């Protein structure tokens, strides 16, 4: 993706930047959480960040973490994109990077509780709904599962540099 670097977080400073972006999106903008969106999964999560090369600015983040009870099952979540970068495909590339990351961890399943307004995007990326719509913190969500057999990376969609970092 020209102009952006999508990579697994390297160090505490980048994690703090991801948490700050999540705070902006989920607490301040969407009002899903009152004070913080941090939870017990943050400690074991793999964070993937998207950076603007032109501005050295964090423009998106997502986390992946193993299910605490089901071996081989992973979860994705807290996909947050800076408001000024939401029409540039950042979310799509973060989702692709997350799928590739858990695939490399030999995940058998990869799930996410997706906000209802984002379900169609995930369906276009070949994720399948596996639950009815439910309310989480007062907002409609649906549990979806990635097709881990789909290869997203291609020369047209992922730079060699990005692919090597994921």
Image: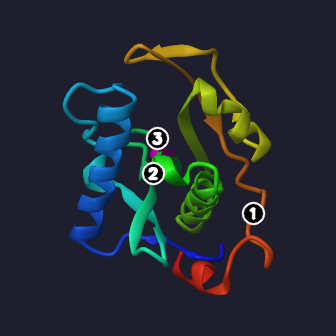
Quadrant in which the C terminus is drawn: bottom right
Disc 3 target residue: 70
Q: Which mark is residue 86?
A: none
Q: Say if the magenta span includes residue 131.
A: no
The residue nearer to you, when weighing 137 against 50, is 50
Q: Foreground mark, 2 or 1?
A: 2
Tell me which corner region of the image, top left, top right, bottom left or bottom right, holds residue 112: top right
Mark 3–mark 1 distance (CA, rounded to whole Å): 25 Å
Q: Position of residue 133 (x, y in %)?
A: 60, 15
**Dot 1 crowding, Cα within 10 Å, few <14, some 14–19, many 20+:** some
Which segment did they paint magenta?
75-79
Mark 3–mark 1 contact, CB under 8 Å?
A: no
Disc 1 target residue: 152
Disc 2 target residue: 82
Q: What's the magenta bit mostly, secondary-structure-wise?
A: strand
Q: Say if the magenta span includes residue 76.
A: yes
Q: Secondary structure at mark 3?
A: loop
């Amino acid at each position: 993706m020209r102009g952006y670097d999508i990579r697994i977080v390297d160090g505490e400073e980048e994690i703090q930047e991801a948490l700050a972006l999540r705070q902006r999106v989920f607490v301040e903008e969407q009002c899903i959480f009152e004070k913080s969106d941090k939870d017990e999964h943050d400690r074991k999560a793999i964070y993937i960040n998207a950076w603007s090369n032109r501005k050295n600015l964090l423009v998106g983040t997502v986390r992946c973490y193993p299910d605490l009870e089901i071996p081989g099952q992973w979860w994705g979540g807290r996909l947050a994109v800076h408001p000024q970068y939401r029409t540039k495909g950042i979310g799509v590339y973060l989702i692709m990077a997350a799928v590739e990351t858990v695939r490399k961890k030999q995940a058998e399943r990869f799930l996410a509780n997706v906000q209802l307004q984002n379900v169609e995007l995930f369906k276009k990326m070949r994720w399948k709904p596996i639950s009815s719509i439910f309310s989480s913190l007062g907002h409609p969500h649906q549990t979806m599962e990635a097709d881990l057999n789909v290869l997203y990376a291609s020369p047209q969609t992922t730079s060699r540099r990005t692919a090597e970092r994921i």
